[in-house]
Amino acid sequence: MADIGYDKPLYILPFDHRASFEKGLFGFIAPLSPEQTATVAASKEVVYDGLKLALTKGVPREAAGILVDEQFGAAILRDARGQGLITCCPAEKSGQDEFDFEYGAQYREHIAEFKPTFIKALVRYNPEGDEAMNRRQAARLKDLGDYAHKNGHYFMFELLVPMTPDQHDRLEGDQHLYDLHLRPSLMIAAIKELQAAGVEPDVWKIEGLDRREDAAAVAAAARHDGRGKVGCILLGRGSNEAGIIAWLKAAAPLPAYIGFAVGRTSFWNPLVALRDKKSTRDAAVAEIADNYLKWVRTFEAARKG
């Protein structure tokens, strides 16, 4: 395990969302026309410009990273790599309950073209869920992680643990109760099951946890048994600003937590205002930069204590 892990600061601005941009932001239905594709790609350039502006305002360049998809962000990935920024590419097909590769068996060729720092997989994995599906997912994810490590990439694993129907019934669909009392232990069980199946992420991208002891227990699972360099970053899950700040403050003092990946809370409102012509492009870029900078400053201040 000595060669697994990434433990330097990592402040990711993720905008690899596909359905959220196509349908949620613009109301487009796939397959998109060339004009619609260009519209989505242009909106992602706004987010990227927000990150670049934040670099001039004090975000440490060596920790700043983008997570964007090839479909709408190929030019961004090339530019960011050329500028020496951390780049992350998603490997998963968007919006699927079961992890599968966006480009099927050709996924390796697509990764090789962009040479990202990190290959990211978003996975819905509940250890009390469908066992056969979990096994299928784990096998694909082991292949992906092995490919990443053999070819000089880091492997980032975005773990979502959605309620099973049975858990939903037990908790009468109460998401807050689930997040507080059930999800932390399920996350730990999921991490250990995946590790046992040979899935070895360098960074776990995990949903925020309200209690510091839960954040610490999840980090301990990620780092157990010789995985002392494995990092954890918090994802935003579309939460409000107060929720993001609370999660960052809970996790930042714990050594395993090296940063965050907060997307929609950073860019959604500015892009909606721009779409509706209630804002200018420059104003949207500035607002995205300020939001991203806020997460960086919150995390760094909490880290210092």
Image (tube, rainbow, N blue to C red):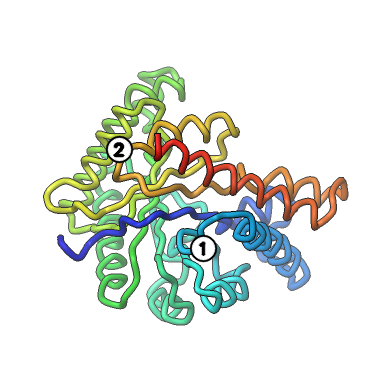
- Asked where in the image residue 247 lies, by quadrant, the reply is top left
- Horizontally, is 196 left or right of 112 in the view? left
Tell which of 187 and 218 is nearer to you: 218
**Furthest-right residue in view?**
277
In the rendered structure, which disc, 2 or 1, sits on the residue that comes first in sequence? 1
Q: Quadrant of the C terminus?
A: top left
Examine the rendered structure and indicate whether residue 74 appears above or below residue 300: below
Residue type at mark 1: give it. Arg
The crowding category of the residue bearing disc 1, from other C-alpha atoms within 10 Å (few below 14, some 14 to 19, many at least 20), is some
- Which residue carries the number 2 mark? 187
Question: Measuring 22% from the left and 62% from the top, which residue is drawn there?
Answer: 4
- Horizontally, is 95 left or right of 256 in the view? right
Examine the rendered structure and indicate whether residue 16 appears above or below residue 297: below
Question: Measuring 22% from the left and 38% from the top, which residue is drawn there?
Answer: 189
- Horizontally, is 125 left or right of 80 in the view? left
Tell which of 293 and 108 is nearer to you: 293
- Horizontally, is 70 left or right of 146 in the view? right
- Which residue carries the number 1 mark? 61
Report the Cα–Cα distance between label 2 and label 1.
Answer: 31 Å
Residue type at mark 2: give it. Met
- State yes or no: discs 2 and 1 in contact (Cβ < 8 Å): no
Location of residue 198 in the rendering, given as x and y in whole percent from the top left corner: 18, 58
SS type, badge 2: helix
Q: Quadrant of the N terminus?
A: bottom left
Location of residue 148 in the rendering, given as x and y in whole percent from the top left corner: 31, 70
